[in-house]
Image (cartoon, rainbow, N blue to C red):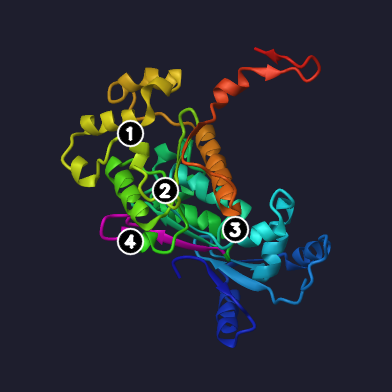
Amino acid sequence: MAEHTVFDPSRHDQDSIVRGLFDDPTIDVLDTTADQLLSLRQLLPTAADAGEEPPRWVYYPWHRTLVRVLGPRGFDRLRLDRNRNKITIEEQARLRGLRIGIVGLSVGHAVAHTLALEGLCGELRLADFDELDLSNLNRVPASVLDLGVNKAVVAARRIAELDPYLNVQVFADGVRADTLDSFLDGLDLVVEECDSIDTKLLVRHHARARGIPVVMETSDGGVLDVERFDLEPDRPVFHGLLGELDTADVAGMSIEQKSTIAATLLDPSKLTARMTASLPEIGRTISTWPQLGGDVALGGAAVTAAVRTFGRGEPLPSGRRRIDLDGLVSTGLDPVAGHAEG
């Protein structure tokens, strides 16, 4: 068993597998369902079917651990109870119907995990061909135990430990022209967080053809980018900043030419001062684009807010928003005097 497995002991065939795992002295067992049931019964309003649904056993092979949890309805009700009423029960049920794809699992890891934290989807598809490197651990919330593991698998495992019932599909080869259709099929929204200009264009052109909105967050300066291809089927990709450039147009370009395109997309005039100063140093004194863990965490929160708004059916127009935390924290409003400081 390569990934986690949920067992229903009320089924004889699955109960026999659980018993076999119990008998394995190398496997740890964790059972806190008595406490979980108590917490479930204390919820307001009372969960109508609290305790009636049989608990499940979940096996996590990468930890060699068997964990007992509430059944799916009780688990969801208890785990997400503190969302209310920022998210109502009715909204939560509607959001649980969303199917979301994420391409690129560095910034995308923070996005995927935050979406799962809030219970904002019923299915996640995670695509990344790359393996976790030690240099990723300044911004990817993983650990040294995950080094060398595919980034999409790392994110999927972390989500499985949070919510074993969430349907997460891993595309460990990333997305290509020949696999993108299967990745996009049936999705409600795509979050694009990859580094490749080719893939960025490929995802957008295919998403536009299917009427799927695309959301992207660029960590420098907290840029949240929304393209509502579901509402605007003729909208130019990247808001027309690159014309109708497609993947074939950039296939033969040099790294320098692609870097110029990336700079055009980011709008150099709006980069933070430290990022602007870093650009000429890339390849000379620094290896690549600098990124901070806090900025990536902000990206996860920003994209999650966009998905929450989208899922509620509230206005989420195409365009860009900037959430410059460095700029925000350098000023403040005195709560007594009522004026800005800094």
Q: CA distance from mark 2 to mark 1?
A: 16 Å
State the residue position of label 4.
181
Against 223, residue 127 (above or below) is below
State the residue position of label 3.
95
Nearer to me, 60 or 29: 60
Mark 3 or mark 4: whose residue is earlier in sequence: 3
State the residue position of label 1.
241
Secondary element at image label 4: helix
* Residue neighbourhood size for the residue with mark 1, other residues' Cα within 10 Å, grouped as few (<14), some (14–19), many (≥20): some
**Which residue is located at x 64 percent, y 83 percent?**
10
State the residue position of label 2.
232
Please say if the residues under marks 2 and 3 sit with CB atoms less than 8 Å apart: no
Please say if the residues under marks 1 and 4 sit with CB atoms less than 8 Å apart: no
Find the magenta span and give its range: 166-181
Q: CA distance from mark 4 to mark 2?
A: 20 Å
Residue 17: in magenta span: no
Left or right: residue 33 versus residue 112 is right
Q: CA distance from mark 3 to mark 1?
A: 32 Å
Give the residue at the far left of this rendering: 252
